[in-house]
Amino acid sequence: MPVDAAAVHDQVVRAARAQGVGEVEAILASASQALTRFANNAIHQNVAENSSHLSVRARIEGRTARASTNRLDPDSIRGVVEQAIALTRLTEPDEESLPMAEPAEYRGVDRWAETTAGITPHERARAVAEAIRAVEFAGQTAAGIYSTDATEYTLLNSRGVHAQYRETMARFSITAMAAGSSGWAKASACDCRDMNPLELALSAARKAAESAAPRELPPGRYTVILEPAAVLDLAGQMFGDFSATAIRDGRSFLNDRIGKQIFGANITIHDDVWHPLQSGAPFDGEGVPRKRLTLVENGVVREIAYCRQAAAHAGVAPTGHGFPLPNESGETPANIVIAGGSSTVERMVASTERGILVTRFWYIREVDPYEKIFTGMTRDGTFLVEGGRVTAGVRNFRFNQGLMEMLSNVELLSPAVRASGEETFDMVAPAMRVRDFNFTEVTRF
């Protein structure tokens, strides 16, 4: 049964006023989530959950705190408001605390697909079974997930903010495992019809077959061709630094680098919630409308994200990238779009005399926060390219690579696509051919 967000908010406001508190915010979210999980060429789990969640924030004389509940009866609503107020009164005041946001118009975006919201377990199982058969036919073993979410989100406050968003999302991930190799593919889409599980399964099976009996190559610097998932896995590690709060705190690699060229001239990056391949709400955790940002233009850092508090401190307008308060992170760009080029992975391979083709990375850890150097490993499809063609699978490598160096050494870009990687976040990214990528050792698996 749909939740009446306005009615819940009215109860929140009345309960707060009964406690003598005038500033209050309510975030109400409801979700229908379903998951079909498979392994060893068989479905072994199907789960579904419908949930509602209310989060209440109070503000009293520069203090703020939040309390949450998953019960929406009047007594529970009154109780969570009282808890939020009690917590607020116990906190220390913040001299930079701002009154709650005022209403502002935001441009809506439609990311709701009834095909995804209404998909049945049978439909997911049928798609999974077809994918499993493709991997099984190749003599391999399949494992993965097919999930669907339908989420509705409303943010209201006592100053009149009323921001609403709803979204559906489907995700399919598959790993094909052979005797001494594996292949992987993953995709996500607001409309499940824009995702092809069979095509993903065939890609994973092909990678597992082509990387059989992998050769061991010496560590060193190689030309690499990074598929979009690998670009996301590694480049996606840096965008929390495009934050005014992180820069002010001295924990961003962009300190003293805004306005400077730190990447190659062929690298342009936007934060754009309205991009047709993106997802997410067009407002932030306080209800502030998002702005399209040019984070990097031709290798030069141009813009960063500002929440309301960081913007007030800097004397600029907020960009609509703040998290729900209270938080210590401030803000971050959430809808990354790395501009692509006109090449393709196939053309990159054909024009490479010797290099490594990488499907994805995993187990990524930061080595140097200011120089933005990371270590991690390749996984599920790493290949040797010789004379313009893929000639063999290779044993996985560990790398030690700086992002500024990597994004200064990009030679070719494919058109950008919606990419899914090791983490749950997605972004729009191209494949890249990069020279002098630093592989430091061969892994044991």
Image (spheres, rainbow, N blue to C red):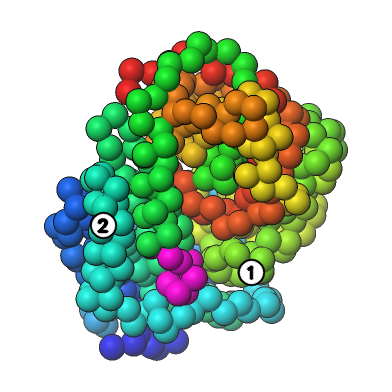
Q: Give the vertical position of 95 relative to 291 (above or below).
A: above
- State how many labels appear: 2
Type of amino acid at the residue the image marks with label 1: Pro
Task: Write down the quadrant of residue 246 in the picture.
Answer: top right
Would residue 36 be counted in the magenta stretch?
Answer: no
Q: Position of residue 8 (x, y in %)?
A: 38, 83
- Residue under the point 17% across and 59% down: 43
Q: Give the vertical position of 350 relative to 213 (above or below).
A: below
Type of amino acid at the residue the image marks with label 2: Ile
How many C-alpha atoms fall within 10 Å of the one at disc 1: few (<14), some, or many (≥20)?
few
Q: Give the vertical position of 240 relative to 382 (above or below).
A: below
Which element type, helix, strand or loop, lies under badge 2?
helix
Q: 70 or 13: nearer the eye?
A: 70
Res. 132 mark: 2
Res. 276 mark: 1
- Residue under the point 49% across and 39% down: 359
